[in-house]
Amino acid sequence: MDTTPILTLCEVEIYGECPFGTWGLACDKACPAECSDWCHQGDGSCNTVCGGQSDPPLCTKNCVSTKWGLNCASSCSDHCVDQLCHRLTGECSQGCHGYEDPPLCTQGD
């Protein structure tokens, strides 16, 4: 019987998720404020959804003045003066046409 010792090595890789809102090897970096969902654990880039920006995953291009919301998919209300609204909330930024409750502009005169 052969009694030669045998050594077997295995490579082990362990992955984990950073807590919500953080990224990096030690999860010590904050995700950009523009990332409305979560950011990439390796480079901090935004997920496929941008709040008030139109270019996921980078989220660097603000919505044009007549659009708002996630990926700028919503149009500002026609109740807003010149259809201008806040890129994150959709609230009318220049006042209302025929509505007395700025910035929401939902209640008529």
Image (spheres, rainbow, N blue to C red):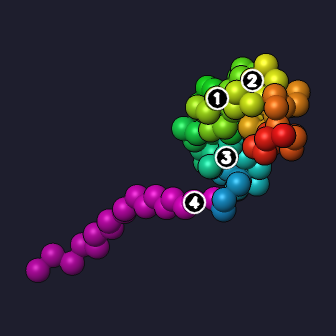
Q: What segment is highlighted magenta in the picture?
A: 1-18
Residue nearer the viewer, 24 or 62:
62
**Which residue corresponds to mark 1?**
75
**Spatial distance from mark 1 to mark 2, Cα to Cα?**
8 Å
Query: On the picture, is 100 further left or further right than 60?
Result: right
Mark 3, other Cα within 10 Å: few <14 / some 14–19 / many ≥20:
some
**Spatial distance from mark 4 to mark 1, Cα to Cα?**
35 Å
Say what amino acid the circle numbered 4 marks.
Glu
Q: Is residue 6 magenta?
A: yes
What residue is at 70 percent from the left and 27 percent from the top?
Answer: 78
**Which residue corresponds to mark 4?**
17
Q: Are marks 1 and 2 in contact (CB under 8 Å)?
A: yes
Q: Is residue 32 magenta?
A: no
**Spatial distance from mark 4 to mark 3, Cα to Cα?**
17 Å
Residue 73: horizontal and vertical position, in percent? 58, 31
What residue is at 62 percent from the left and 38 percent from the top?
Answer: 70
- Mark positioned earlier in the residue sequence (4 or 1): 4
User: Which numbered disc covers residue 36?
Assistant: 3
- Mark positioned earlier in the residue sequence (4 or 2): 4
**Which residue corresponds to mark 2?**
83
